Amino acid sequence: MNNREVAAIFYEVADMLQIKGEIIHRVLSYRRAAETIEQLPRDINAIHAEDGLTDLPGIGETLAEKIDELLTTGELTFHKRLAEEVPQGVVAMMKVNGVGPKKAARFWQELGITNIELLQEAAEAGKLRELSGMGKKSEANILEGIKALARQTDRASIGHVYPLAHEMLDRLLQLEPVERGSVAGSLRRYRDTIGDVDLLVAASMEHAADIMEAFKNFPEVSNVLVSGETKTSVELGSGLQVDLRVLPPERYGTLLVYFTGSKDHNVRLRERALARGWSLNEHEFQPTTDDREPILCATEEEVYRVLGMAWVPPELRENRGEIEAAAEGTLPDLITLADLRGDLQMHTTFSDGKTSVLEMAQAAADLGYEYILITDHSHGLGVVDGLHPEQIAEQRAAIDAANEHMQGRIRILHGVEVEIKANGELDYDDETLARFDLVQGSIHTSLRQPREQITERLLAAMRNPYIAIIGHPRGRLYPDREPADLDMDRIYNAAVEYDVALEINANPMRLDLDAAHARRAVELGVKLSISTDAHHPDGLRNMHYGVGTARRGWVTAPSVINTWPLEELLDWAERRRQRATS
Ligand code: DGT
Ligand code: CA
Ligand code: CA
Ligand code: ZN
């Protein structure tokens, strides 16, 4: 048994104990042990062999005996006994968002529900609301949770995968024989969710075995799935799969193109190659008819040159028109991180942010930004303690002081993320909104309204002349929340008519607008903003996810208002404001 399997058994024991109503202390000791084992940088079997289990944090004699039993027999009597009492389906119900052990136990004991399917039937039949302490609303939440669970695939959010993958790649690049390397696959293309990680390195093949060996011994690796000369696949503790491929430097270009994908893009490339008398694979171009020498490509540019086209940025490689554009020389000049002069959405301790205005400003200045917009929540968003109208002057003073302190290193603008209420009204009246430099409006609640209603709601907000930007327009959160059912074309047309920018929220769980919507919006002439929605200085570093998403949406810098110089941005804000007061 590997670490993850042992941890899984302990998690289940904790869950079953909790459903049975055991004292929380006992439950927690199993759960803590599971966490410890899951995060162990070493193989638990090795620690077991050294008699070192009780040295692990949170593992005493009792737990060590249980681990010993598991590792030597592959089973745990205690686990089996519990599993006879508590049906697996009841444990599984706890995966549904909104169902904890208490509710799972009650559904089971009071309603005889023993799995998720039965839970869904009961919720749809309105039976859950009859339990004391439950209501229509919690019943609807559970139904929503069941649907979210059904949608859930094994794909991880890019925000989870990106740091891990780059840390592993950096370590590979430091190995002596490795000449170059890259992430490939969906991660290089900046898809918002990632199936598995693909890493590539170029090295002389005599060193391939050493590189693979080093890779298999990386501390985050919990399981080796495939171990070959040019390809190794491993599984990390989190269950994420990572594929590493090693190829000689003179073939690095074809390798990188092939494993960056997408498959659909590759298919088109191979067709073009065939039309030119070549068969293209990850190793080389091979002649199909004559006895020309194979062509080896060390760079991607060479691959595309042989195919008679311009190099295609990875984010565009989805066969959505980029093949034709690259052949005609009409690829867009995509926005880059360096184009962004400011970040227009972030929170401070005036609402649910973790740090002060000044700390956010300093961090943003360190990232090279020329300006930022502070956008704390208005107070009407019940779930956070937002900015009360009485606090606006106080925040303005804090911003003035921070501007003074920064001595022109960065310009801090005073904004707000005003709540668009369920009926489309804004949380602040116009007089209050007029006190901010730039106002962003967002929906956070009642996201499940019917299409017509929620579309009208957003349109009503967009008609307010003070609203300059709509934050995270569709309100999605991966993997927990589907986007609202908005009529996006109506939103885009209104955005053009009222000159409202739509946000690409760079928080990797949001990425909203997503690439496809951003592309459509820009085609219709909509302005965008790309902002991190940071609640902490570290969050400002998420900008690249937003930029990657914009690039996947074929977005160029001029469409994005925070690539504009400060003067231009302020002029735009001023023009909007004059319209508001005229
Ligand atoms: P993922 O992992 O599901 O997020 O998506 P990808 O695009 O990373 O897919 P993956 O990991 O299966 O393969 C990485 C790349 O390798 C893929 O984008 C294209 C290339 N590739 C893999 N298998 C095939 C194949 O059967 N045919 C072609 N043409 N390309 C393939
Ligand atoms: Ca992949
Ligand atoms: Ca793969
Ligand atoms: Zn928000």
Image (spheres, rainbow, N blue to C red):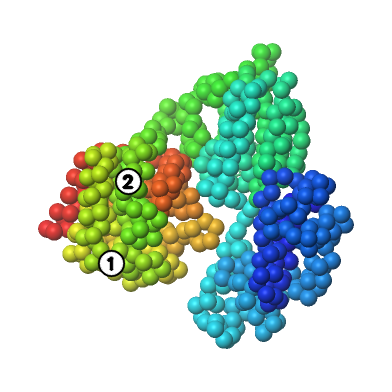
Q: Residues within 10 Å of mark 1 (few under 14, many from 20)?
A: some
Residue 123 seen in the figure: yes
Where is residue 533 drawn, in percent x and y?
39, 52
Where is residue 238 drawn, in percent x and y?
65, 50
Q: Residue at x 40, y 37 (%)?
A: 337
Pick the residue in front: 492 or 85.
Answer: 85
Pick the residue in front: 407 or 461.
Answer: 407
Residue 278 seen in the figure: no
Pick the residue in front: 135 or 60.
Answer: 60
Residue 206 — which label?
none
Q: Residues within 10 Å of mark 2 (few under 14, many from 20)?
A: many
Residue 7 in the figure: left or right of residue 296: right
- Residue 144 lies in what quarter of the image? bottom right
- Residue 222 lies in what quarter of the image? top right
Q: Residue at x 60, y 27 (%)?
A: 174
Of the two numbered discs 2 and 1 on the same chain, state the one appearing first in sequence.
2
Q: What residue is shown with label 2?
A: 361
Q: Up-down: is 57 above or below 525? A: below
Q: Up-down: is 79 above or below 114? A: above
As helix, strand or loop, the secondary structure at mark 2 comes to: helix
Amino acid type for the residue under numbered disc 2: Ala
Q: What residue is shown with label 1?
A: 388
Q: Residue at x 66, y 43 (%)?
A: 220
